[in-house]
Amino acid sequence: MRIIGGTAAGLILKTPEGLGVRPTPDLVRQAIFNSLGGRVLDARVLELFGGTGALSLECLSRGAANATCIELSRKHARFIEQNFTATKVAAGQFQLRLQDVFTAIPQLAAAGATFDLIVADPPFGEKNVGRRSTSLSQRLLDDEQLPSLLAPGGMFVLGHTSRDSVTLTPAWEEVKEMKHGDSMMRFLKRKL
């Protein structure tokens, strides 16, 4: 697992052992950033379910103005901090919040925070044929305050497994969908 592009390209990221975290694979990240193009430059980024911090650190490497990374696990947060230090990005550009995503979202909304790019590749949900998804990805789509965190013209990139059929809520409009193996990435805009 490595940073693919920008000033920290080639940097090998530290990842926790075991199945506690499923980092977004290099090929999937490459496809995401190819699709985002120049949108990352000078962007204010929010990464939900940080894991290794790979998505927000990749954004910083590619010229994002700043990134906020939300991760609940103290163990995973230590890896994110080590990875951030290794990127040599200025300390003021990165904030790590050790808390539950669904606690952080209303706090950020209450503070009036907005982001140009929100990225989330949460732990995968299970197959949900014949019923509505209960996955973390679906919970993000259902969250009524998340759209308010997206700046006008901003993009929300959401990952989920292909066997987890998520339902877009009226707040979101899909711009693009990508499939890589078992990973689905949805590029969404806020409906105005």
Image (cartoon, rainbow, N blue to C red):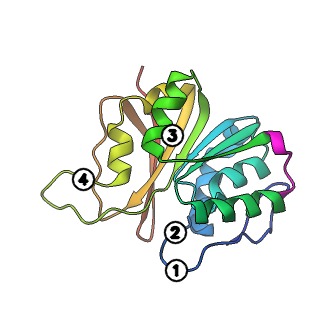
Give 95 or 74, whichever is nearer the viewer.
74
Q: Amino acid at mark 1?
A: Gly
Instruction: Indicate yes or no whether the magenta region holds residue 91.
Output: yes
In space, the residues marked 4 and 1 are separated at their CA atoms by: 26 Å
Instruction: Point out which mark residue 156 bears.
Output: 3
Q: Residues within 10 Å of mark 3 (few under 14, many from 20)?
A: many
Crowd class of label 1 (few under 14; some 14 to 19; many from 20; radius 10 Å): few
Tell me if mark 2 has few (under 14), some (14-19) or many (20+) residues whose alpha carbon lies within 10 angstroms of its own.
Answer: some
| Residue 8 can be seen, yes or no | no
Residue type at numbered disc 2: Val
* Mark 4 or mark 1, earlier in chain: 1
Mark 3 secondary-structure assignment: strand
Looking at the image, residue 164 sits to the left or right of residue 188; the answer is: left
> For the residues marked 3 and 4, what is the alpha-carbon distance in whole angstroms?
19 Å
Is 136 magenta? The answer is no
Which residue in the structure is indicated by mark 2? 21
Report how far apart the C-alphas of labels 3 and 2 lie in the structure: 21 Å
* Residue for badge 1: 18
Cα distance, mark 2 to mark 4? 21 Å
Kindly indicate whether the residue at mark 1 contacts the one at mark 4 (C-beta within 8 angstroms): no
Q: Residue at x 76, y 35 (%)?
A: 42
User: In the image, which is nearer the foreground, mark 3 or mark 1?
Assistant: 1
- Mark 1 → mark 2, Cα distance in angstroms: 7 Å
